[in-house]
């Protein structure tokens, strides 16, 4: 079986070392509120240039799902979510910690995370080949339809205003079109700067949009440093006997995360919130949720880790990043000359199955790390953020300069950082912008290829039942929010009729 052969790749000493380094760094990033996996992966992106593609992706993936593990620690001990998907864990985790059950709460989070991650890995093992088998028949028209679906889903599924999401996608596509046209060789939107002939660096765009604004945002909202609740590894070991009641909560949460993880725009955050809502509905004793119930930790933690694994399915097999983090990992593959999509599994099976196998190894490493080192993590969350943020800014600037030894890229990342901060201030999500930046050039490439094959006939884009079906899904994603808005208005007018 291909999955088993992937362990020979994942257990190679170099890959194993970088898997360990990735999950350790991700864990630290998750423990420290205010950094986030996106900023950490952006900072690490230049490092991947000196690594083999498989090693690089294994490390970046480790940071991603490692942050989901670490985020629960800050949520439980500080009442501050390490990542957005861990926010719901604070509702029951922190009350448990305050009444002296921090060990049980932390152990529940770690066991649920491992179980959810394992569920997600199994889903990826069995679903990915089916998706690849279906999509190997894709031509330019089908790829165009799929990428268009990814752009539309990315614009409307980020929350908030769909129009803002669409605007961000278009801006991202415009930024992605900067540089020399691959077909004609004509410079586009270079504004006379030779540095822009190769286009904007994805490293500068990712770091600028997520790294710097994150620091600025946390500085603005900083409410001072807080002391965590004391906890020891011994108290976690003593809590093992109390975990029998969470098995069905874990299964429900992992199922929610496994289903929602591959959907563009869903990801771990939405999965964890929906899993908590489901658990509160079917778990019984609703009034106990939010006061420190163990099931309120198990379900969302299983969901966000299952979603973190299954989010790789559309990214690797179709080339569609469902989250901004996946867009950065997609960019890392493209930097190494590897095009994500159905051919990736066929042309680079060692990369794909080695990555999948590394997921399970990384999840086990995280459990082994977190239980004995919980005292270390508890002290780490007390590091004053005023010391941490200047280091992050320095790493961002140093990292982007190291990509091409270009001061232009440093100015570019600072400019994108200012733009990203402004966008957040006015409640514009930068995530669709990054998705548009990554997918826009690919969409243009397949559109041009389709038109060259058909001699300029746009009807070729609807020439297969697969392409038509994908376009129908795209239209459905656009129409459903509009119908929902229309129904809400009709219902509101019905309930509150205006007197004549």
Image (cartoon, helix red, strand yellow):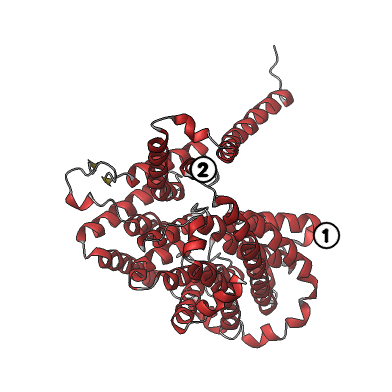
Residue 54 quadrant: bottom left
Q: Is residue 35 left or right of residue 317?
A: left
- Residue 94 in percent (x, y) is at 64, 69
Position of 479 with respect to 9 (left or right) is: right
Nearest to the observer: residue 11 or residue 369: 11
Q: Which residue is mark 2?
A: 142
Is label 1 or label 2 in front?
Answer: 2
Asked whether residue 98 appears in the rendered view, the answer is no
Q: Nearer the viewer, residue 495 or 474?
A: 474
Element marked by disc 2: helix
Q: Residue at x 32, y 65 (%)?
A: 396
> Is there CB contact under 8 Å for labels 1 and 2?
no
Q: Residue at (33%, 73%) from the top-left corner?
A: 50
| Image x and y of residue 115, in percent | 68, 71
Q: Residue furthest top?
A: 500
Going by the image, does 382 lie left or right of 185? right
Q: Which residue is mark 1?
A: 284
Q: Quadrant of the C terminus?
A: top right
Q: CA distance from mark 1 to mark 2?
A: 46 Å
* Residue 310 pos. (x, y %): 60, 61
Note whether residue 464 is visible: yes
SS state under label 1: loop
Q: Residue at x 52, y 38 (%)?
A: 162
Count of residue discs: 2
> In this orientation, which residue lies closer to the viewer: 126 or 70?
126
The first of marks 1 and 2 along the sequence is: 2
Rendered location of residue 451, percent (x, y): 40, 35
């Amino acid at each position: 079986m291909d999955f088993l052969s992937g362990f020979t790749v994942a257990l190679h000493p170099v890959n194993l070392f970088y898997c360990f380094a990735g999950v350790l760094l991700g864990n630290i990033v998750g423990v420290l509120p205010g950094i986030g996996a996106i900023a950490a992966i952006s900072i690490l992106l230049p490092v991947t240039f000196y690594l083999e593609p498989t090693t690089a992706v294994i490390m970046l993936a480790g940071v991603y799902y490692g942050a989901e593990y670490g985020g629960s620690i800050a949520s439980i001990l500080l009442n501050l979510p390490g990542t957005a998907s861990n926010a719901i864990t604070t509702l029951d985790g922190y009350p448990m910690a305050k009444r002296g059950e921090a060990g049980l709460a932390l152990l529940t989070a770690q066991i649920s995370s491992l179980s959810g991650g394992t569920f997600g890995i199994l889903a990826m093992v069995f679903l990915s080949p089916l998706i690849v088998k279906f999509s190997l028949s894709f031509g330019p028209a089908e790829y165009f339809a799929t990428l268009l679906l990814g752009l539309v889903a990315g614009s409307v599924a980020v929350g908030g205003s769909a129009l803002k999401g669409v605007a961000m996608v278009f801006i991202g596509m415009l930024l992605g079109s900067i540089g020399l046209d691959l077909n004609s060789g004509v410079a586009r939107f270079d504004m006379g700067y030779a540095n822009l002939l190769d286009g904007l660096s994805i490293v500068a765009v990712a770091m600028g949009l997520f790294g710097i604004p994150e620091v600025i945002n946390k500085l603005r909202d900083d409410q001072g440093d807080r002391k965590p609740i004391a906890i020891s590894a011994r108290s976690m070991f003593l809590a093992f006997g109390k975990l029998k009641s969470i098995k069905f909560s874990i299964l429900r949460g992992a199922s929610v995360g496994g289903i929602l993880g591959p959907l563009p725009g869903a990801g771990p955050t939405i999965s964890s919130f929906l899993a908590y809502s489901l658990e509160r509905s079917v778990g019984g004793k609703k009034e106990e949720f939010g006061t420190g119930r163990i099931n309120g930790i198990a379900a969302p933690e299983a969901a966000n880790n299952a979603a973190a694994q299954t989010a790789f399915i559309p990214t690797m097999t179709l080339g569609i990043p469902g989250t901004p983090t996946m867009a950065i990992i997609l960019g890392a593959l493209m930097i190494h000359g590897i095009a994500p999509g159905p051919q990736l599994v066929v042309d680079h099976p060692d990369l794909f199955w080695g990555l999948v196998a590394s997921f399970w190894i990384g999840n086990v490493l995280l459990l082994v790390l977190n239980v004995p080192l919980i005292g270390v993590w508890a002290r780490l969350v007390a590091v004053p953020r005023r010391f941490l943020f200047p280091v992050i800014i320095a790493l961002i600037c140093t990292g982007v300069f190291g990509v091409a030894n270009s001061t232009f890229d440093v100015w570019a990342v600072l400019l994108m950082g200012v733009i990203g901060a402004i966008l957040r201030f006015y409640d514009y999500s930068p995530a669709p912008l990054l998705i548009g930046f990554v997918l826009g050039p690919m969409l243009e490439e397949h559109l041009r290829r389709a038109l060259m094959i058909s001699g300029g006939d746009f009807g070729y884009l609807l020439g297969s039942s697969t392409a038509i079906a994908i376009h129908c899904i795209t239209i459905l994603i656009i129409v459903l929010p509009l119908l929902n808005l229309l129904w809400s208005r009709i219902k509101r007018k019905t309930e509150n009729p205006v007197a004549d």
